[in-house]
Image (tube, rainbow, N blue to C red):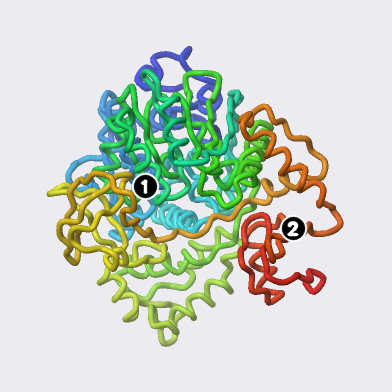
Amino acid sequence: MEIHQEVLRTFFGNFNNLNAIQKESIPVILDGNNIIISSSTGTGKTEAVLAPLISKYLDESLLNDRMTWLYITPTKALANDIYRRIHPLLSKLHLNVGIRHGDRDETRLVKKIHILITTPESLDVIMKRNDNSLNDIRALILDEVHILFNTQRGLQMSLIISRLKRHILDHDIQIACLSATIASCKDISSFLFGNSENFYEIVKHSHKMIDAFITIITSKEALLKLIEKIFTGPTKLLIFANSRIECDRLGSILWNSEKLRPHLFTHYSSLSTQMREKTEKDFNHAETAICIATSTLELGIDIGDIDAVILWGPPWTVNSFLQRIGRGNRRTKKTNAICLVSYESKNKYLDLLYFYAILDLAKEGIIEKIKPMKLFGALIQQILMIIATNQGAFTKTQEIINIANIHDHLSRENVEEILKSMSEANYIKPHGFKNRYGANDGLYRLLDLRLIYSNITISSRDVKIFEGKKEIGHISTKNLLNMHPGAIIRFAGRCWKVVKIENTKIQVKSNDFIKDPIEIQYSSKGKYISDTLILNRIYDYLSKMKINFDIIDKKVRTPFSNYINNLISIFSPSHIPLIRLDDNFCYLTFGGKLCNLVFCQVLGINELKIDQIGIVSKFPIDFSKLP
């Protein structure tokens, strides 16, 4: 089977314009195979799978005038971006593109949708409706699947697809997965599909040279001076911070510069959809701009060509580092990465060493290899959805088992144990004599409160922030305890004066910067845990590997070298190094934060501080007591 010539012209112009990934993937997909492609951002993965899938089922879709393709993204922002990118192309082929997520629903507006772009949660809602529009789905595209790997959302997506496949009984669904550079495609396909699917794998690692520079920023003034120095002429900079509060702090520092202020953007999850979309659009089209973002812009949202990526503090994984720097310099053979250790860091030279280790591993093409986790939590939510889809009626236990057992660990025994626990918690109830379960009061209450559609733990209720009629964003209601009319808050990298506070919203107006505004307290999504890959590399530097100081700022080379030599002098592979800090004991375990927490719990230690590298204690620790 050959690709439809009209599709080829629409996506690529002609065959000579195909890159290596596209040339390999197109015949594989046209032959009907499932595929997973792992490569860096901007390598044409979307076109590599979408063009042949459109070609394969185009005639059938136009003839039946039914929904034929599902395109699933992990975020609403990426769904919107994919819609903007493919809608003009597919309209040339007389195909209607629809979008469905928490902020947009075109499934009820567009009469005939041929390809639907959605998120896992929205697909779950459509499935609950028993929507017949899904009956003719032929192909499923899952974008940025590495985001879902080893998460409850990923298991949720896996079980939704299992339900979808059982909903469509008369034909198979062809599946294409797109991912950033990962260590193992097989691990991702195993996590999402268990033993139910086979995949052809295409892996293309980036061979772009990384031109990196690492330094320590000593003050706010030094940061401002450096950014102003870099920001000359038509320049686009993307600055990644590790948290929303750091985005706000960085924004407030750069806002003090008259040179930078007109070109400054922020982007993170607490901003309103309207604000985020405006930032993405304006930053994309700007020739001169700076955007400060969290991991929200690690995904493949189109933001144009970036001249340099600046990292404010080291990310926690090599994979995240590659995702971030991969957003820059797409049109050149070199990626510019500026790695900055914050003046607020409690151990600046350790953070600098952490940066160096990540960069060293990235240049060697070594990334984290994490085996699929055996998760259970999302199965509870999916059991509730299965029964709710059946209008609460008694549902065969075997029906639930058949959906779950694509994963070996979701065995009959485990599923039945979960069903029993859910029954004891009053969410569902067993049939008197048949092996079935139906809805109980707990499930009906979840439906009434619309809390059934997500497996994510519900955090405290949010309150929206408005400037006039324009929604700026949303924050946790716990922030209201620190606010009053007239208070100055920092949000979206700017200062705002609180005008009025109500139960569901806060009215603000723009305000000049002040020295100590009220900082927003964001709901934590969990502490990042470093992979042992990076910690092991740091361990190697202290035992045998040499450090190349050329990429480190000349101003900090000497003190950094002294720091490393001091660590080496106390280092021995046969025991845990100990440093005395004032009257405290600092043990360098290189175990990672989670492992160090376990050490302290098992040994009954009241630690002063725990981080990725070690433990600080008031008293000596006897590690020989570990079991």
Q: Residue at x 64, y 74 (%)?
A: 606
Q: Quadrant of residue 255?
A: top left
Q: Which mark is residue 130?
A: none
Report x, y in % for residue 459. Answer: 37, 66
Residue 504 screen position, x and y as percent: 19, 63
Earlier residue among tags 1 and 2: 1
| Nearer the camera: disc 1 or disc 2 | 2
Q: Secondary structure at mark 1?
A: helix
Label 2 SS = strand
Q: Quadrant of the C terminus?
A: bottom right
Image side of residue 268 versus residue 295, left or right: left
Residue nearest the observer in this picture, 1 or 563: 563
Give x and y (percent) for residue 429: 39, 82
Marks 1/2: CA–CA distance: 35 Å
In the picture, measured across the screen, residue 37 lies left or right of residue 255, that is right
**Is disc 1 surrounded by few (<14), some (14 to 19) or many (20+) residues within 10 Å?**
many
Q: Which residue is mark 2?
A: 579
Residue 617 location (% of width, % of height): 68, 68
Where is 354 relative to 387, above or below?
above
The front one of 161 and 103 is 103
Give the residue at mark 1.
Answer: 248
Q: Nearer the viewer, residue 535 or 105?
A: 535
Answer whether residue 34 is visible to the viewer in this image. Answer: no
Picture residue at 57% right of the left edge, 35% below the top: 215
Q: Is residue 606 above or below residue 485?
A: below
